[in-house]
Image (tube, grey):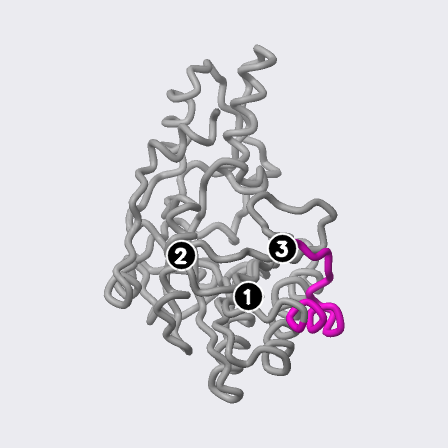
Amino acid sequence: MCNFLAGLSEQPKIIGADVIETQPHHCDAFFKADLTSPKETERILRQTLPDFIIHFAGTFNTENIQEVFKANVLSTITLLEATRHCVPHAVVIATGSAAEYGTIEPDQLPVDEETPCRPVSSYGLSKQSATQAALYYHRIHNIRTMVVRPFQLIGPGLTPRLAPGAFAQQLKELRTTGLKTLQVGNLESWRDFLDVYDAAEGIWALCQNPAPGEIYNLCSGEPTKIADLLQMMIDYSGTEVDIEIDPSRLKGRLDVTKVYGSYQKIRSHCGWQPKRNLSQTLKAMLV
C-alpha cells in the first residue's frame, strides 16, 4: 500500500492508494489505483499535493520474478517520476527490506547500513533495485528520497505468508477447532523482529527530520530464534500443539541462517528506538 501523508501537524491527514477495493482503516481518504500506471499515479498526486509520500506498495511473491519486479520496482519508479513532475517538494520514503542484505557472515552482525547487499531471493533483489532507484532520483533529480529497511515486522493482522503470521493464524484456528497439529518450516533460523507500531513511529520521525539520500535500518537490534518465538506464542495461546514440519514451508538456499540489525544510525539522526517488547506484540497477535 502507498500512503500519502499530507500536512505538517502531529496528526496528519492520511490518504491511501492501493489496488485493493476496500479502504484500509485509519485513512482519511482513499484512491483505488494501480501505482505502476503513470496516469493514475500522477492523477492522485495532483489531486492531493502531499507533503510526505510513504511508499509501501509491493509483493512478497517470489515465484514469478517478473511480477515481483513490476510490483516492487516499477511502482517505485512510477511514483518517483510522478513526484518529480507533480510534487517535487515532497519528502519520499521508499520501503526497502532487510532481505536486501541477503547472505550475512557472523562477523558482519549486527547489520548496519554499510553492510554490502547480497540478496538471495527475487524479493530481496527487487527491493535492492527499488532502493537504488530511490537514491538515483535524489542524486540526479534532487527528489527528497530516503529509504527505510525494516527487518521482520510483526503485529496483529500479519500476513500468514510470514512465519509469525502463520503461527498466529494456526494457533487461533487450533484453539477454535480443538485440533493439535501446527505446521511449520525451518525453526532454526534467527530473525530480528520489530513491532509494526514502532516501525510506523520510526518512519514518521524521519518524515519530520528528513535526510534525503540516506538509508535507515528499522529493527529491534536483537536476534530471536524462530523456535523460541513459536514456543512463546504457544505458551501465550494456552494451546497444546503437536509441531509438524511442512516441507513446502522450507526455503532451502533462500533461508538466511541468522540476521539482526543495528538501529544506531536512525537513533543518532532523530532519536528513534524501539519501545515495544516482543512479548506484548506476540500476545496482541493472538487475541
**Quarter assignment of residue 159:** top right
Q: Where is residue 21 in the image (x, y as percent from the top left)?
A: 74, 48
Query: With respect to residue 96, does 232 lie above or below?
Result: above
Give the Cα distance between marks 3 and 1. 13 Å
Q: Which amino acid does label 3 sit on?
A: Thr
Neighbour class for label 1 at 10 Å: few (<14), some, many (≥20)?
A: many
Q: What residue type is labelled 1?
A: Leu
- Is residue 132 or residue 248 the one in the foreground? 132
Q: Which amino acid does label 2 sit on?
A: Glu
Q: Where is residue 240 in the image (x, y as percent from the top left)?
A: 46, 14
For mark 2, what is the residue?
10
- Is residue 27 or residue 103 the one in the foreground? 27
Mark 2 and mark 3 lie on one chain; the one further toward the N terminus is 2
For mark 1, what is the residue?
125
- Is residue 95 or residue 63 the one in the foreground? 95
Q: Give the range drawn in magenta.
A: 30-46
For mark 3, what is the residue?
59
Neighbour class for label 2 at 10 Å: few (<14), some, many (≥20)?
A: few
> Can residue 107 be seen in this snapshot?
no
Q: Nearer the viewer, mark 2 or mark 3?
A: 2
Please name the residue shown 56% across and 62% down the image.
Answer: 4
Q: Where is residue 89 in the image (x, y as percent from the top left)?
A: 51, 79
Secondary element at tag 3: loop
Query: With respect to residue 128, does 197 lie above or below?
Result: above
